[in-house]
Amino acid sequence: MSVHEFPAAARAFRTAIEEMTRAALRPEVAWRDIPAPGRMAPHTWAAEGEVLLHDDELASGRIVILHDPAGEESWQGEYRMVALVQAQLEPEFAIESMLGDVAWSWVTESLELNGAQARELGCTATRVVSQSYGALASRPSTVDVEMRVSWTPDTPATGADLGPHFAAWAAMLAAAGGLPPAPAQVAPLVPSHRARARSLTDERNRG
């Protein structure tokens, strides 16, 4: 059951979300809707997801969809997609100076692959390298990447087709998890790099 309740005034938004969630995603991506922040726009919807391959969780994140029927000047449209993508990469990425450029390519290629036309596209990629010393020196080094992405769907005036944008978010998760680009109905078998999703257990262990 959905956690979202749409008021009567949000009929167009509800229809767009219902159609979007029927879109075929990559088979490795599992998602569920979650309570959406209520102050970012008149109408909002949110979901969290993770990339699962052979019972391993490779990446995780969430997406928030904002809608203002009156339009928002800073968005240059009525809809705005706000996405978070997180993964823990192999230690070799600690010295990869181009990781930010690689992360940006995951964004642009995911949008292009899924035919998601976007404008006002922005991304912040953060790399966190954790290395332990002293009594904790036996702990392996870790490299976390976090991508915060936002864009405005370039949708036709006849209605918002958000399906390609939802699929693009799933593709960003898959790319961060090391899976090569693939149409939604095709499941790749071998990741291009080793990754796993960040977890609360990891955060506690770092303390």
Image: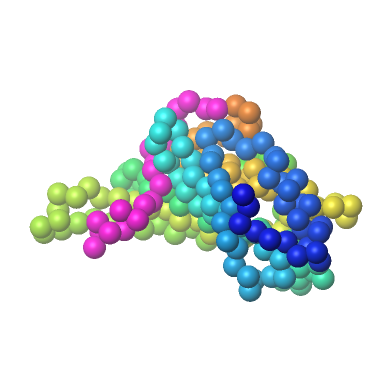
Assess whether residue 192 is covered by the magenta stretch: yes
- Locate residue 203, reporting x and y percent: 31, 58
Q: Quadrant of the C terminus?
A: bottom left
Q: Residue at x 39, y 43 (%)?
A: 196
Does 187 sit left or right of 121 as displayed?
A: left
Assess whether residue 37 is covered by the magenta stretch: no
Q: Residue at x 20, y 56 (%)?
A: 132
Relative to residue 192, is residue 1 depicted above or below? below
Q: How is the image coloured?
A: rainbow
Q: Residue at x 46, y 52 (%)?
A: 86
**Which is more toward the observer, 148 or 102?**
148
Relative to residue 70, is residue 182 depicted above or below? above
- Locate residue 156, reporting x and y percent: 85, 52
Note whether residue 153 is visible.
yes
Residue 55: which quarter of the image?
top left
Q: Residue at x 63, y 33 (%)?
A: 184
- Locate residue 39, reporting x and y percent: 63, 74
Q: Residue furthest right?
A: 158
Note whether residue 103 is visible.
no
Q: Which residues are magenta?
A: 187-207
Does 106 sit left or right of 79 as displayed?
A: left
Residue 7: which quarter of the image?
bottom right
**Which is more toward the observer, 19 or 197?**
19
**Which is more toward the observer, 9 or 84?**
9
